[in-house]
Image: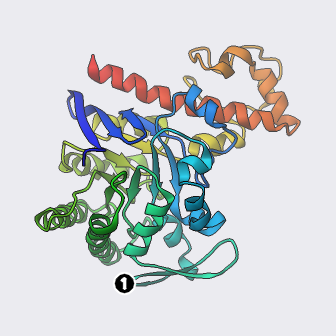
Amino acid sequence: MKNFECKIDGKKGNARALTFKTPHGEFRTPMFMPVGTRASVKGITVPQLHELGSQVVLANTYHLAMRPGVDIVKAAGGVHKFSNYDGPMLTDSGGFQVFSLADTVKLEADGVHFKSVYDGADAFWTPEDNMKIQADIGADIIMQLDQCTPYPATREFVNDAVELSGAWAKRCLDEHSKNGREDQTLFGIVQGGMELDLRKKSIDLLMKAEEESIANGGRGFGGFGIGGYSVGESHEVMFETLPEVAQSLPEDRPRYLMGVGDEEAIVRAVHEGVDMFDCVLPTRTARMGTAMTSEGSLKMKNAKFSEDFGPLDPKCDCPVCKNYTRAYIRHLFNTNEILGSTLLSYHNLYYLINLCKSLRKEILS
């Protein structure tokens, strides 16, 4: 598609530096995406997102479909105009949120029945429905509807989820090819739990769906999500299979490790060939008073910071570290001032975004 282009700028071992063109501008990888679940990154304004170097913001299809509703987002001109964010945006399918509501979910081959967490209303999504909803929301990158498996899970359960996700990937791609927007690209999602052979089976199903779509005059996938990790397993368990999974995906498109946002995992995953990351961790932990720093995680409510007038992180050049002390940030949290959450959210996002920028420099050097 002419609206989307992927270029490999450099490689170092399995690590890659990409430039990916979208209708709302280019982004460069490795890259961390702030999560704006309801078309809002908690505590952060759009000008601040640009200041801290955000390239792509992620929004959630499930939550936007439930509140305020797809019709309102569409009437506003799409999620970019609705949120006033003019850079590239990505919507996940909402599948993770649907399947996390295990007590209310009824799964069938055609789609999934579930209840809204907002008002308890019944809802049903087919893969085609999900594509239409994401088309109306209007992000640049959309994700297929898939079934995310928990950890631990039986091999039979994981295999069934792989087959269902593969069948839905084909249906999503067919719908996207027939009725999708030219200014959107679809990413397929790899499932398979911690079973390497099932992960490879999932990739084979995605590539078969793409091959059939292109043979029939349809589209291919613009990139690939790697789902079903960071669902309770340790890093060591995840990295038993992740490297080979990432390296089994096509080289000419982005690889997006979904829901991973801690420093150690990002660094290791980049060196294994992963390009994109997202997670609520930096903003969620910030609201609880935890700062990500070069010295490790700091619990800013601790009394030891009460007379510490140094910067949050001496090695960080973000505005928070330049202008505020540890003692002041501790004071904000201990007096329940909302500014504390905003400052730590800004810093934590800046920290991970710049971690990825430093990894890109390392690859290109």
**Residue 123, relative to residue 172: is it above or below?**
below
Q: Position of residue 87 (x, y in %)?
A: 48, 38
The three-letter amino acid code for the residue at tag 1 is Asp
Total marks drawn?
Answer: 1
Q: Residue at x 77, y 17 (%)?
A: 308
Q: Nearer the viewer, residue 130 or 324?
A: 130
Determine the image quadrant of residue 63. bottom right
Q: Nearer the viewer, residue 302 or 50?
A: 50
* Extreme residue toward the right, this view: 335
Can you tell which quarter of the image residue 221 is in?
A: bottom left
> Crowding near pointer 1: few (<14 within 10 Å), some, many (20+)?
some
SS class, disc 1: loop
Q: Is residue 301 visible?
A: no
70 on left or right of 232 = right
Colouring mode (rainbow / by chain / secondary structure / one colour): rainbow
In this view, 201 is above or below 358: below
Task: Look at 60% across and 43% down and name the residue there.
Answer: 84
Measured as percent of width and height from the top left, residue 299 is found at 70, 34
Location of residue 129 in the rendering, given as x and y in whole percent from the top left corner? 43, 74
In the displayed structure image, the side of residue 170 where residue 114 appears, left or right: right
Task: In the rendered view, tell whether residue 231 sits above or below residue 362.
Answer: below
At a point 10% along the width and 65% down the height, the residue shown is 215
What quarter of the picture does the C terminus occupy?
Answer: top left
The residue that disc 1 covers is 110
Q: Nearer the viewer, residue 142 or 216?
A: 216
Q: Residue at x 57, y 34 (%)?
A: 349
Q: Is residue 255 visible?
A: yes
Location of residue 147 with respect to 219 vertically, above or below = below
- Image coordinates of residue 357 in percent, x first then y, are 42, 25
Left or right, residue 251 beside residue 49? left
